[in-house]
Amino acid sequence: MGILFALVGAGCGSGGRLETKDLLQQSKSLQSLAAEGALLAQDAASGKTTRIYTQEHSSDLFQAASQAEASLKLAETGSALGPQLRQLSVLAGQVSADLERLAIASNEEQRMLTGELEAAARACQEIGEALT
Amino acid sequence: VSLKNILAVALGIFSAIGGFVDIGDLVFNTQAGATFGFQLLWVVVIGVLGIIVYSEMCGRVSAVAQRPVFDLVRERTGFGAGLATLIASEIVNLMTCAAEIGGVAICLQLLSGLPYRLLIPIAVVGLAVSSWVLPFRWIERVFGYLGLCLLVFAVAAIKLHPDWSQVAHGFVPGSHAGGTLMVYLYFAVGLLGAAMTPYEVYFYSSGVVEDRWGMKDLGLNRVTAMIGYALGGFLSFALMIVAAVLFLPNGISPQFLGTPALAAGHVMGQVGLLLALIGVLFAVGGAAIETSFAGAYNLAQFFGWKWGKKERPAGAPRFTLSWLVIFALALLVVMTGFDPVKLTEYSVIFSVVALPLTYLPILLVANDHTYMGENVNGKLANFLGVLYFIVILLIAVAAIPLMMLTNGGQG
């Protein structure tokens, strides 16, 4: 159990100095959250999900995106990676805000959020590709 | 063969299918599909064949010796090795039980909208009351049959129109496009661990004694293990295919237990979504009961206490207290705020480390004429048993290094 807690503890760090690999991981993680949010928003707008499921699942996604946003805002990196870090930080804020709105959005807003979250996912993917 | 017997076999198979998938299968199959597409389907085949080989073996041991496996483990391997096996299996059982309870609470949250932390104790009380009130056979049936709602993923997999030639390629070990070799191996180890979880064989072998199977039921044991687990394996294929078709192209890496249900809803609307959530709820709930019982079976059988659901709770007090304590400890673990998905990943990987301690004694006892008489392992059972034991040893050694090197499969 000691090993377990050590491993969990090791995975709980936030902020700090990010290298290319860390930033790539952050971009993938944020892309995943945005893409899943877009799928959820699309299905919610089409009546394929229940109201409770949309609220609860978007809330889970929102919390994860908020954590990513907070972590990116605190993070530091070398000057070469600065622009990507700033872009990702802004995107994390947008994704986080979109996911928060999704929980209570009307059908029309859900359709709009689908587009915004898809665009955010694409932007994250482009940042990730630029980093590789 | 009477109609009644056929019905009994069919019901046993249905509950085995519904009870096959637990939170470990849900997490690892969807993550593997979302990362590597169909490329790891072959690992599911190996894992399912492994659990068939060893479940058949331990079911046969229990039916012939009329004693559950853990009872024989201590007698055959001695106190020290038996105690090491007991401690390892109890830690893994507790972690798995905690993860499953977290999974039940998440499903209830997605269905009801009530707060997760409120639903954790409600889930534990519900599971404990079900365990107390329902006879053994009905626990298997209720959770197994309602777990069959997971078949919605099989329908979703077909309706998503995967490229079936690519699916077929996935059954042949080969490339690992989409991630590094280390991540590929990590998921291979996780998928094997999820399919061959130790609690399944302990629960299965104790169930044989609970259901009073004897020599006449060896055929039933073989059929239930082979068909039940094999068909249950199709649910694992379905989960991986759904993730490969829907999540991989969109760059979605499932981090939440609610994500697989989104796929069912995407394909079949609200009915699909609700069936998926109910299926996960009962599959994971049934697994929570199985893990708590497996832990109590092991303790009672090791120390020679009276055990079993065939007894009234007061008739086997230490056994009853054991599974209640396991539920209580699991409740404490989940209430600390551990993410159930992360807890699942750790519990599966740690269970892989404990696999040799579980499976070696079964292999030894199944080959011992003193216990088994003429029903010792045949050549095929021994060949597969030894082959799988070598595989188990290899993945047990590799599991934790791979988890650390890949940061839990994240690369």
Image (cartoon, helix red, strand yellow):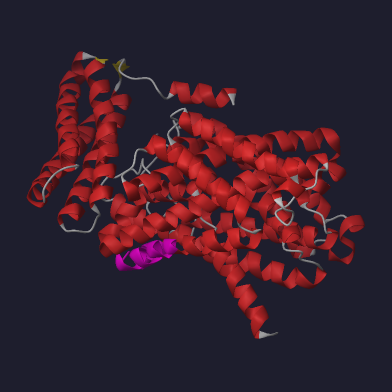
- Furthest-bottom residue in this view: B2
Q: Position of residue B203 (x, y in %)?
A: 67, 52
> What residue is rendered at 57% in x and 46% in y?
B128
Q: Which residues are magenta?
A: B149-167
Q: For this view, does B56 lie left or right of residue A10?
A: right
Q: Along the line of sight, which residue is nearer the eye, B251 or A126?
A: B251
Which image quarter: residue B317? top right
Q: Main secondary structure of the magenta part?
A: helix
> What residue is rendered at 28% in x and 43% in y?
A56
Q: Position of residue B44 (x, y in %)?
A: 52, 55
> What residue is rendered at 28% in x and 32% in y?
A63
Q: Position of residue A10 (x, y in %)?
A: 45, 21
Q: Please say if B204 is above or below B254.
A: below
Q: Along the line of sight, which residue is nearer the eye, B356 or B100?
A: B100
B150 part of magenta stretch: yes
Q: Position of residue A1 (x, y in %)?
A: 59, 26
> What residue is rendered at 42% in x and 48% in y?
B32
Q: For this view, does B143 lie left or right of residue B319?
A: left
Q: Is residue A132 visible?
A: no
